[in-house]
Image (cartoon, coloured by chain):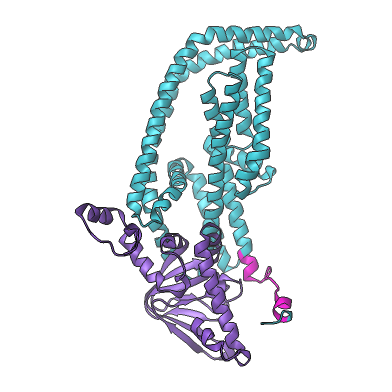
Chain colours: A cyan, B purple
Amino acid sequence: LIFSGRTALPVLLLATAAYAFLQFREVLLPFLLAATLAYVLNPAVSFFEIRGIRRERAVLVIYTIVLFTFVSCAYLGVTAVMQSASNMAADMPRYVGKAREFIARLDDYAWLRRLGVSAWIEHQFMQDGTTWLLKAIEQVPALIRHHLLPLLEMAFLIPFLTYFFMMDGQSFFEKLIDFVPSRYVEMFLNVIVEINHSFGKYLRSLMLQAFCMGILTGIGYGMVGLHYVVYIAFWAAVSSMVPFVGPISAAVVAGVVALFQWGTFSGMMKIIGVFFAIRTIDDWFLNPFILRAAVHMHPVVTLFALLAGAYCAGLWGLLFAVPTMCMIKVLLEVAWQWYATEYGLQRKTLASEIVDVPLV
Amino acid sequence: VGKSPCFRGQVPYTSGVLKWFYNYWLDPEFNRKRKFLQQISFFKNIPRHEFGRLFQALAVRNYQEGEVLFEEGDVGRALFILESGQVEITSDSDGQHHRMAVLGPGGYFGEMSLLDDLPRTATAQALTSCRVYLLYKTELANLLMRAPRVGVAIMSHVAEILAGRLRLTMEPRTPKHVQPFVEEVL
């Protein structure tokens, strides 16, 4: 009954879209990123539009501001990274010495000595690690050849596509409605409206949470005096968009920096303490407020989405896994709601109130 | 001309700069849509500066002559407001085909679906090619939360219409001094 003629078409379209995405995911990626960016910026355009400003002018203003901010941040970021890289190169011998001291001190503990922890770390990080680093440095020109060009292509292509998505997104949607058969207009609008609300809430919550995580991490690790705190905070903000993996990866990065900077147990304990403080604030105060409006998913489903995303599209798949799963969940909910109302499964019974309460 | 000429109807072109500003930045379509929708009783209580929020909630659809907008028995989920063209509302009750109304620009239908998920009681078909605004139930719920002044104004009007219709059905019981008010609402 569910797969009647009326519902088979959307299901077939969805399946075709999923298959096409898997087949052409490399080509579709810049379009997907540009569409997401345009979607995130759309509320800013709407702010002007609801005040009677022409859409094209509003898009131009927002686009210029975002582009200027992005280029400024990129310039400042690259300058800061270059400066930090030269500082790091100068400090590297001292950092390595601190790390060696810390690893050597592990042998003071009999049980760690018996397990051969320090020898293992020395081998993994100092010998194998050095070999790996040398190999990685040798591969840099090849990596640049292979990845820089696509990255530059993306850097030009995404802003270009974003502009057109922002400019023509609304009229494209209006034209799309005209193509939908008249009897399915309401169904189509229902799906679009629900996805827009849920997906919009999720994206905005995610970005707000990433911002808060970046600030918290910056303050937390800054208070204990960790070096390169701005980069760690930036990584914490970006990686917090990937559930589970993100927060831990930021803590690992902070731990490695602490190992090289202090090379002491107390230093490592500071990092662990700050990590747990950030997690507590995030779980108890931020999440209940920021993500309360977002689509809720079971942790098992989230993990499945992450694994499937990583398998299908690598790093980008990890980033888009949860939003895609959210969209699928909303689609299923809308389909069920539609089915239930269509066949009267969830019809509210007000009969007793209508009949028994006198009409005055 | 209102107190803030930027977004209020006709603009007094007092200088070339102002004229350029209005032509370059302001959307003439915005004013046209606002003027049209202000005439619809559903939106009469919406403050002028809130109409932009209403536009964001409305979808537009063009229908060809003879196209069926919805059929009797379909579950309704949207209010239809006719901007141009003509729509015929018919019903097949008692085994007979009744023409209930022919609506022109400014007419609306399907307001009951903003309140419940019950099947439509009539069929709507375009007599000429027409342009229709659709207010979807979920969008109205969103308006109620995000722009309460707009949402409440629409909901109050739906409630007024329903209350008026109810009083009409129980006309023999309605006191004579109340009847003029009922007629005014309807």
- The residue lying at 41 percent from left, 60 percent from top is B49
- The residue lying at 33 percent from left, 66 percent from top is B32
Residue found farthest to the left:
B16
- Residue B84, position as x, y percentages in the image: 37, 75
Which part of the image, by quadrant, shows the C terminus of chain A? bottom right
Relative to A171, B144 lies left or right? right
Nearest the eye: A40 or A2: A40
- The residue lying at 78 percent from left, 10 percent from top is A114
Above or below residue A174? Residue A223 is above
Report the number of numbered marks.
0
Relative to A157, A204 lies left or right? right
- Residue A355, position as x, y percentages in the image: 72, 81
Residue A242 visible at all: yes
Above or below residue A100? Residue A328 is below
The span picked out in magenta is A338-355
Relative to A233, A346 lies left or right? right
Q: Is residue B138 magenta?
A: no
Residue A160 visible at all: no
- The residue lying at 38 percent from left, 66 percent from top is B34
- Residue A334, position as x, y percentages in the image: 60, 60
Nearest the eye: A6 or B27: B27
Which part of the image, by quadrant, shows the N terminus of chain A? bottom right
Q: Quadrant of residue A103?
A: top right
Relative to A155, A321 lies left or right? right
